[in-house]
Amino acid sequence: MSLTTPTTRRRRAAAAVVTAALLVPLAAACGNDKDSQGSKASSPSGSSGTAPKSAQLTVLAASSLTDVFKAAGAAYEKENPGTRVTFSFAGSQELAAQVKQGAPADALVTADTKTMDGLKADVNDSSIIARNRLVIAAGKGNPKKIEGLKSLSADTLKVVLAAPQVPVGRYSKQVLDAQKITVKPVSQEPNVRAVLSKVELGEADAGIIYKTDAAAAKGKVDTIDIPDAQNAVAKYPAATLKTSKNSDAAAAFVKWLSSPEAQKILTDAGFQQP
């Protein structure tokens, strides 16, 4: 059995202290390196706050935006390579129902503020991107000689309107009621494009639609203007959905709709600026 002297014990203790001192910074360094790697791994992409360079966007839009948004979407994709914009068009009331049912979409544009206001729990702050007005659409050549709103009350005339819950239907009722004109429509349609189609196909003699839809059907129907004093102004609000999985890209698109380039596309199609 070997004997351990006091001197030997002191030397061993000193060596243990030195070894421990050397191991502490080494362990700390390893820990810091691990933390650094972990931090990098958990850092979410796009944390800089900028819109992603590529995204697949789905935009729910009012039927009256069908033609102009196809042009706007193409322009936006050209300006933002890697971003794809897909539109789903329907009456604003149908779009609202889709949003409430949790439809996978990123942004919404309606043809009235009432519909958008009813979705405050589902959308972020909205902004008006355009305005529109009503006109009367008649068969090509206006064979029934329709002159204005009063003409629509004739019993011999087949008039088609949008349903009251549809923005253009609500606007139509507003202008007719203001002039104390009673119209008995042969049908009430789910969106403005359906009203236009009935007139184009000769299934109705006349209908009330937006000025922009009449412009898109130039040569297929005749247009009778409604004086401003008797007309209604349709406002188009746009907003991102709170459930969007592409919130940055969706916000960038909605903001772009108010840009000079987008506004020119809208005004060229007959829409009025906000």
Image (spheres, grey):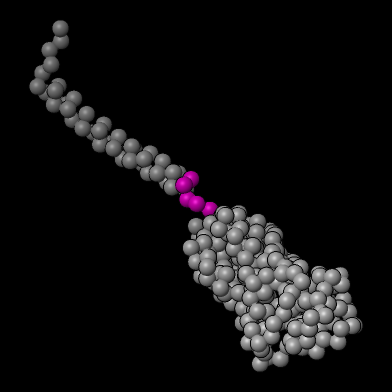
Q: Quadrant of the C terminus?
A: bottom right
**Most common secondary structure along the magenta stretch:** loop
Check if residue 42 falls in the magenta segment: yes
- At horizontal 13% and vertical 16% (from top left) the residue drawn is 4
Choose between 178 and 47: the one closer to the eye: 178
Q: Is residue 151 in view from this perspective?
A: yes
User: Where does residue 112 sit, x and y in percent of width and height?
Assistant: 61, 74
Question: Is residue 248 positioned above or below 24 on the image?
Answer: below
Q: Quadrant of the N terminus?
A: top left
User: Where does residue 119 sit, x and y in percent of width and height?
Assistant: 53, 65
User: Where does residue 256 sit, x and y in percent of width and height?
Assistant: 63, 72
- At horizontal 86% and vertical 78% (from top left) the residue drawn is 139
The range drawn in magenta is 41-46
Check if residue 238 falls in the magenta segment: no
User: Where does residue 75 sit, x and y in percent of width and height?
Assistant: 73, 69
Instruction: Farthest residue to the top: give it.
Output: 1
Residue 263 location, quadrant: bottom right
Residue 114 location, quadrant: bottom right
Asked whether, in this view, residue 51 is left or right of residue 79, the answer is: left
- At horizontal 22% and vertical 29% (from top left) the residue drawn is 16
